[in-house]
Each structure stands twice: as C-alpha cells, then as structure tokens.
Image (cartoon, rainbow, N blue to C red):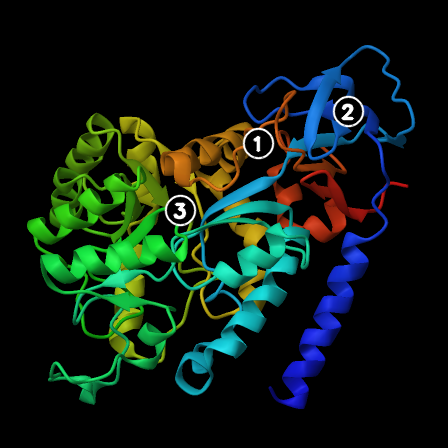
Amino acid sequence: MSCFKAAVVAAFLTSAASALQGQEAGPILFTNVNVFDGVNETLIENANVVVTGNLVTEISTDDLVVAGGRVIDGGGRTMIPGLIDVHWHTSYCCAAQSTVVTGDILEVAIRGALGSEATLMRGFTTVRDVGGNPFATKKMIDAGEIPGPRILPSGPPIGQTGGHFDYRPYQAVPTNPGDSQWYWYGVGLMAMADGVAEVTKRTREVMRMGASQIKISGGGGVSSVYDPLDVRQYTFDELKAFVEVADTYNTYVASHLFTDEAVQLAIEAGVKSVEHGFLVSRETMEMMRDYDVWLSIQPLLDDEDGFTFDDPFSQAKWIAVTNGTDRAYRTAREVGVKVAFGTDILFDPALAARQGAFLAKLQRWYTPYEVMRMATSTNAELLELSGPRHPYQDGPLGVLEPGAYADLILVDGNPLEDIDLVADPEANFDLIMKDGKIYKNAVD
C-alpha cells in the first residue's frame, strides 16, 4: 500500500474511532420531541422516546424516567426515522470514473468506505447497494469498526456480453475460453454471464459472497457504450434462471430496465424490482401493479445535478431518459404502483453530497409527508423482499415504534411541512443516531 493510501486509512480509522467512542451505558431518554413515526402524517407531539441498547423501547406523551441513563432535551425538534436510499452504490458513488480506468479495487474500496461515513452523516442510516463490491465495508460497519449506514448488498451487478455492465475496452472481443476475466470482473466490482448455465453459476457465486438480493441488467443503459436503450438484455430463459436461483435463496431479483418490452419480459420471468423505468408506458405500469412489482425510480433530471458524459452517445441517452422522468412519476402515482426512492449517484463525490437534495426533489410529485414516508417505511417495505437474506432482523427499519431499530434523526424544523430541510442535513439534522449510537449531536 502506498504511503498516501496508508495515511488516508489511518486518518479514516482515527475519525471512525472518535465517532464510535463516548457512547454512554444505559438507556437514553429523549424528551420534548415531535415524532414522525415513518407511517402516519400526524406527529406525536411533545413526546418522550426511550432508546435501550440498539432499539426504541418506548414512545409516550407521558412523563418518563430512565434509571442510570442519559436525558437529551429535544427542544421541540422533530424526530424522524433514519432515511433509506434503495438505489445506492457504495463502490461507485465516491470514486471518479477515471478510477475505473486507472485505479484498483483498493482505491475503490477506500473511497467507498470514506464515502460511507459521509452517507451516514447525511442521515441515510440504511442503503440498498445495487451494484459493486461493498462487502468488506459492510462487514466493518456492522462490526462497529468504521461509521456508515446499514448496507443490504447486491454484490457485483450481472450483465451480458455487450450489455450495460460490459465496460471492457472495445478490443476485448472476440474472446476465447482461455481468456482470463477482465480485472473488474475478477475482483467482483461487476460480473458477466451469458447463457443459462453461466447465469445460474454466477448468481450462486454472488449469493455466496453474501448478497441480500441479486441485481442484473435486463435492458440498455445510459453510461455504457455498447447497448442502445431499446435493447432487451437476456432471453426469457436466462431471466428465469436468475429468478429461480434467487428464489432458492428465498430472495429476489432487481433489474436495471427502462423500456416496455424489457420490463414486461422481466416481470413475466419473476423480477420483483424494476430499477429506473423512466420510459415505460401506462400499460406496463399497470402490469407492474398487478404483478406486485416495485418501481425503484430516481428523481434524475437534466438540471444542475444532471450527469455529464464524455461519450456523446451516452449523453444523448441521458437526455432521452431524463425527458421521461416527470411522466414516469406522474403515471406511477396515478396507476398505484409501489414506488421506492433512490439516487443512483455515480462517480462523483461532490454530487453524492447532494443525496438529501435528491430526496427533496420528490416534492415535484409528492407532498412532504409522502416524500418522508417513501424514504422511511415504504423503502423499508421493499427491503423486506430479501426475506431471510435481510441482514438486519432484530427489529423493523424505517419506523419509530417500540421494538424498532434506534435509527433516528432530530431535525431543526418539521420536514413534513418543509421538505427542503432534508436537502441540507449539515445545517438541519442536529442529532443522528444509528443502532442506538449517536454519531452527531448538536443538541447538547
């Protein structure tokens, strides 16, 4: 490891250690807070909340006393559940795209771990990672060695030759059976499989790595250069193989998809989460509703946060996709599809810092209450599709109720009235707790 990387790691671990120290033994009593429980629009006003260990153990408007514990006066702030992002990339969010060309997996992992602390400090206490290799980062976060959100990992996203996850150089084909895997496939940052036999094996390998669910690409993408948006990726038999293997592990498949034909084929094969879906019709939305399939869509617009690509083909695809964003949200709401919130921020640490601003953009289509419910209890419902592969089963996520995980935020203001508060967590999130541990406290 270079001296620079060693210094970065040392500084990070020092920061992590200081963040994890100083937690007091015994219960914590929060007084004088207005609680949004993640479900109901009406706040529990002037409430008292007790956290014992890593769980919420009591919420009451009666006076409460805790023996041997700590009392924090919320000062009339709003307490909300920790936020959830169901389309996050721990490995991709915080490393420049050039890193994938010139860097290595150590750099990607270090930058992902550093970015995880920042993610938590934005109030996102849980993420569903839908592509990358965050397993070591998740392991260290769960062990309390570094700060970061809970991670439900999909592991390396799986695509076909010439598909959305085929970022190999143009000269990489034709291949022969004796060729070694491309570097990023070999280290599990992404994966490739062609044919039912390879699909079956690769899916089992990813589950063996510790995935909570499987992520694939069943259609064309924006950032990749070999696949137009209209392309259907994987045959029905291949898609069915993904679903069958995931089902043997009692979990599900999420698929990158944009267009009607690709989404309809995936639904028929048993895919349960459509990632993106910006270009689908009302008819397809109705099919998703009838098959109980989730729309995991992101508020991506060609605005000040719009992605830019050096490749003009990718840039043109970006414009085509974001032109469909408004219609997709409005149609999904009208039809009654289950909609989840995610961001899909890629290769841009500065843009990753605007994760909360992406959440606030949902006010274009939803009320502040609907936005907050989506980013808490609704997103948590999607995570439950992982069944026994869900790594956090001591209590529910995305809600504040007795028995729930003590993932919570004290907001200076009421985001159910002013959703823009979540766009600036540094200024407005005065306390951030995850798993019963306080990582930020500007209240005392």
From mark 2 to mark 3, how far is it between C-alphas? 30 Å
Name the residue rendered at 74%, 45% in the picture.
428
Vertical placement of 16 versus 366: above or below?
Answer: below
**Mark 1 touching mark 2, by CB under 8 A?**
no
Q: Earlier in the sequence, mark 1 or mark 2?
A: 2
Report, in whole angstroms, how far the alpha carbon at label 1 lies from the one at label 3: 16 Å
In the depicted view, which residue is nearer to us: 360 or 181?
A: 181
User: Which part of the image, by quadrant, shows the N terminus?
Assistant: bottom right
- The amino acid type found where label 2 is placed reads Val
SS state under label 2: strand
**What residue is pinned by disc 3?**
212
Label 1: few (<14), some (14–19) or many (≥20) C-alpha neighbours in 10 Å: few
Graded by Cα atoms within 10 Å as few (under 14), some (14 to 19) or many (20 or more), the crowding at tag 3 reads: many
Q: Which residue is mark 2?
A: 50
The quadrant of the image that shows the C terminus is: top right
**Amino acid type of the residue that numbered disc 3 sits on in the rendered structure:** Ser
Amino acid found under the numbered disc labelled 1: Asp
Can residue 196 be seen from the camera position used here? yes
Q: Farthest front residue?
A: 208
Q: What's the CA distance linking mark 1 and mark 2?
A: 17 Å
* Residue 354 visible: no
Pointer 1: what residue? 394
